[in-house]
Amino acid sequence: MHYFAKYIVLEDRILENCYMEVEDGKIKSFSKKEVEEYEDLGEIIAPGLVDTHIHGYGGKDIMDCKKGYLDEISKGILECGVTSFLPTTLTDSTEKLNEACKVIGDEYKSVTGAKVRGIFLEGPFFTEKYKGAQNASYMSDPDIEKLKKWKELSNGLVNKIAIAPEREGAIDFIKEANAMGVRVALGHSDASFDEAVDAVDAGANIFVHVYNGMSGLHHRNPGMVGAAMSTDSYGELICDGHHVNPNAANILMNAKSRDRIALITDCMSAGGMPEGDYKLGEFPVIVKDGTARLKDSGNLAGSILRLKEAVKNVVEWEIADVFEAIQMASLIPAKSLGIDNVCGKLHEGYDADFIVLDENLDLKATFLNGKRVFG
């Protein structure tokens, strides 16, 4: 099958008025040579989006640990333009995290929507001061034996964990986690600039939702944000207009360069749902006016952002062009985890997981393995 578009976004350039050939669910070729039979998809063909930090969608949460919920989430996020994702856990008891890892490990191969490319453990090795919407009573120092157990229970799927770098044993933990093939992210932390930089030097390579849940940038104490800006790491950004001011997002993009920024959603179960009462882990949350907030404190509790909206937002805010925005939601998050060998770009031999956007960057269709699954 051949698909035609005015623009096809590759990892390093944009093809104009080109055909993409798909055979047996894989991308076979790109060509300007006219073919007799093809489907004209319109304005833009782009790689399927990769959400490396998402807790739930459509009323379902990863921490519910209920059979079938993973598949429901995977199907739901197709309407967000996401074709690959990392189901993301919260800080919780060891037993509950054991259960979550096992459920995902048992079910990930049979999901019928977006593909599961790993598991992101957001916690529990965090610091109470910047707990956000995480339960501080379950927080502790990093424990490599627990990580080994979670990786084993998940059938080896765990490939990302976030920790606070000032916790005791963090440096050794980072090195051992990397040796196990697990990327270490830094967040929910009151670390100093030096502590965060030491963690990056030890092998941590991602800062979790930069600005949110971390010590800020001060001219006498550059903090976690300063370390995020000045190290060769990847920085996650929640570009919903609520978590981070667009000017602050632009400052980070300029400091790090846009090829080190991963747009993520941090979406919780209320994503794609009407306003009302929900839960994030054990916490009651109210969803109103485009935000999800803890009922007791009013703190932001994840988001209800859809990744396709983040792409559109950064372009409308004039802090990224279309090419950069698409890469920040596909190739860059995939690179941050070393999974860009299977997703995040349109390339010969890769699964034909792609999206179609119109001239306003609104999502018109999502394709998995060359088949239209949304739109």
Image: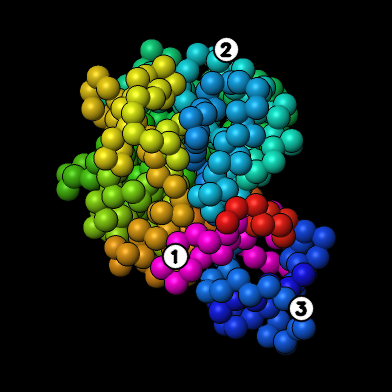
Residue that appears at 25% across and 19% down: 296
Q: Amino acid at mark 3?
A: Glu
Q: Which residues are magenta?
A: 340-366
Which mark is drawn over residue 351?
Answer: none
Q: Do we see residue 279 in this rendering?
A: yes
Q: According to the image, label 3 marks what residue?
A: 37
Furthest residue in direction bottom, as rendered = 33
Q: Nearer the viewer, mark 1 or mark 2?
A: 1
Q: Quadrant of residue 115?
A: top right
Q: Which secondary structure lies at badge 2?
A: helix
Earlier in the chain: of badge 3 and badge 2, it is: 3
Furthest residue in direction right, as rendered = 24
How far across and how far down the image is residue 99, in percent?
Answer: 62, 17
Q: CA distance from mark 3 to mark 1?
A: 26 Å
Check if residue 357 falls in the magenta segment.
Answer: yes
Which mark is drawn over residue 95?
Answer: 2
Which mark is drawn over residue 361?
Answer: 1
Q: CA distance from mark 1 to mark 2?
A: 43 Å
Earlier in the chain: of badge 1 and badge 2, it is: 2
Earlier in the chain: of badge 3 and badge 1, it is: 3
In this rendering, the answer to whether 111 lies above or below 252 is above
Q: Amino acid at mark 1?
A: Leu
Q: Residues within 10 Å of mark 2 (few under 14, many from 20)?
A: few
